[in-house]
Image: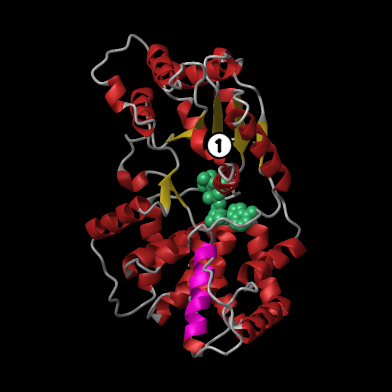
């Protein structure tokens, strides 16, 4: 946070607003680290103590941080590292290697990246190693202090840890865990993953070398805790340059969170996802509606933002369809009603569509068969329809059994919002039977 002087003289509203946006943006979308991460104090303490043992006392260790997407694994690790590096001795000594299973897709690339991050490219030069283990111990040996009495502690962070288990023979994992068990050099191996079953992926010889320490991030806040969190995330702290503005802002945030309609909307978000990431997304959309003309977040802003977050991506895609494609979807919806979700084929859909056309005297929706086929293919590309059995390629296209991947409410809701949807089509969609 900026260390600006807090003065009592009021600042212009425009300045305050841009200051608010600056502060909250950093908090909500620039992944600014909280001073003390909320709800994970125990995990924070555990991990900090574990890493201290390596960084200060030279013990080796291994640990896994496990939690669903967006639960704050990366944030926890970053906070712990920040606090760990506050000690001068640690800052001077500890080396870090950060790998990510999405980037280092095989062990050779991972080894190159390790060498690079440890600044050992020149030491390695053109040397050729017989095995991964040889190469790794060369690297660790090269890190030994001048008098060769002790090594500098190395922290290995493996993000998306589970992906490393797919590397050939799990060589990297085997060797890192092996080093972490032997007294070769002080290393800490920290794996970060969202797979709870990650240990099942490890080969026996790898698993037996792992310490089996796990730190779980499975926080499950109650709704009132969730509401409180929303309020804290939006509130300004005491160091805001304009005291009065900050008080007014915080009061307006409090009022916002007490509003009944806001509470209902938040309840819906709470039910679908409780993590900070999706929460921040919602609050960021609210914040983007704040301006000099609208200097506080109003319930309507939150409701609008909430609607945007909850928009169903598939239903949204319906808005981009052509009228013909939309008609086919409606015909499928009717077939679904009649046959209670049994699969259908293109011929049936076309017949259903024809029934609708016959009831109209002057039809502007007369399409040739190939055009209809094309539309059907497009729907399949968009994954709005899916073949029941993809292996039955032998069947003629028109008779291949398909299923609609949308439900009736999705179709109807999207139709209500379809720009300039012809009334007769809307009526057809609403009619009980095609
Ligand atoms: N306790 C917390 N306090 C404040 N912000 C948090 C907290 N936990 C998570 N966040 C925020 O939530 C967002 C997601 O967290 P993070 O990136 O750490 O998740 P992750 O578990 O690493 O997810 P992924 O598995 O996708 O990598 C970040 O912007 C982070 O700042
Ligand atoms: Mg992460």
Please say whether residue 344 is visible from this viewpoint. yes
Q: Residues within 10 Å of mark 1 (few under 14, many from 20)?
A: some
Does 126 appear above or below 3? above
Magenta-colored stretch includes residue 160: no
Does 383 appear above or below 119? below
Residue at the disc numbered 1: 90
Observer-nearest of 273 and 112: 112
Image coordinates of residue 397 in percent, x first then y, are: 31, 45
Magenta-colored stretch includes residue 26: yes
Image coordinates of residue 265 in percent, x first then y, are: 65, 71
Observer-nearest of 18 and 254: 18
Left or right of 419: which side holds 214?
A: right
Left or right of 295: which side holds 134?
A: left
Q: Which residue appears at 31% of the width and 41% of the height?
A: 396
Please say whether residue 412 is visible from this viewpoint. no
Quarter residue 232 falls in? bottom right
Image coordinates of residue 365 in percent, x first then y, are: 29, 72
The secondary structure that most of the magenta stretch takes on is helix
Helix, strand or loop status at disc 1: helix
Q: Which residue appears at 60% of the width and 46% of the height?
A: 83
The residue carrying mark 1 has its beta carbon less than 8 Å from ligand 1 = no
Q: How is the image coloured?
A: secondary structure
Observer-nearest of 204 and 292: 292
Q: Which stretch is magenta?
A: 15-28
User: As drawn, which residue projects farthest toward the top?
Assistant: 130
Q: Which residue appears at 23% of the width and 62% of the height?
A: 368
């Amino acid at each position: 946070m900026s260390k600006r002087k807090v003065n009592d003289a009021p600042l212009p509203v425009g300045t305050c607003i841009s200051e608010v946006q600056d502060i909250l943006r950093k908090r909500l979308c620039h992944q600014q680290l909280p001073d003390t991460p909320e709800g994970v104090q125990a995990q924070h303490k555990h991990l900090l103590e574990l890493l201290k043992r390596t960084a200060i006392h030279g013990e080796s260790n291994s640990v896994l941080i496990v939690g669903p997407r967006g639960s704050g694994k990366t944030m926890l690790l970053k906070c712990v590292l920040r606090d760990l590096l506050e000690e001068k001795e640690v800052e001077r000594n500890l080396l870090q290697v950060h790998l990510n299973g999405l980037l280092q897709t095989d062990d050779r690339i991972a080894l190159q990246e390790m060498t690079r991050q440890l600044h050992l490219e020149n030491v390695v030069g053109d040397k050729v190693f017989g095995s991964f283990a040889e190469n790794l111990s060369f690297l660790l040996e090269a890190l030994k202090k001048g008098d060769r009495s002790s090594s500098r502690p190395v922290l290995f962070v493996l993000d998306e840890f589970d992906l490393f288990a797919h590397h050939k023979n799990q060589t990297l994992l085997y060797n890192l865990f092996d080093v972490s068990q032997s007294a070769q050099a002080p290393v800490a191996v920290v794996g970060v993953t969202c797979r709870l079953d990650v240990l099942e992926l490890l080969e026996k010889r790898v698993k037996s070398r792992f310490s089996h320490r796990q730190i779980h991030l499975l926080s499950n806040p109650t709704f009132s805790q969730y509401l409180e969190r929303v309020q804290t995330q939006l509130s300004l702290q005491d160091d805001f340059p304009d005291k009065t503005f900050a008080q007014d802002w915080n009061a307006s945030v409090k009022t916002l969170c007490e509003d009944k309609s806001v509470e209902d909307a938040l309840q819906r978000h709470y039910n679908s996802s409780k993590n900070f990431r999706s929460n921040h997304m919602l609050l960021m959309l609210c914040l983007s509606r704040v301006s000099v003309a609208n200097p506080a977040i109003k319930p309507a802003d939150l409701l609008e933002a909430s609607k945007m977050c909850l928009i169903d991506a598939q239903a949204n895609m319906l808005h981009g369809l052509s009228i013909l494609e939309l008609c086919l979807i409606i015909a499928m919806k009717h077939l679904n009603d009649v046959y209670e979700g049994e699969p259908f084929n293109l011929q049936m859909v076309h017949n259903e569509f024809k029934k609708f056309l016959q009831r109209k005297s002057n039809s502007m929706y007369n399409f040739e068969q190939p055009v209809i086929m094309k539309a059907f293919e497009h729907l399949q590309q968009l994954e709005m329809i899916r073949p029941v059995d993809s292996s039955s390629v032998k069947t003629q296209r028109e008779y291949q059994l398909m299923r609609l991947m949308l439900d009736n409410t999705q179709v109807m809701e999207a139709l209500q919002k379809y720009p300039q949807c012809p009334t007769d089509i809307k009526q057809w969609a609403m009619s009980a039977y095609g």
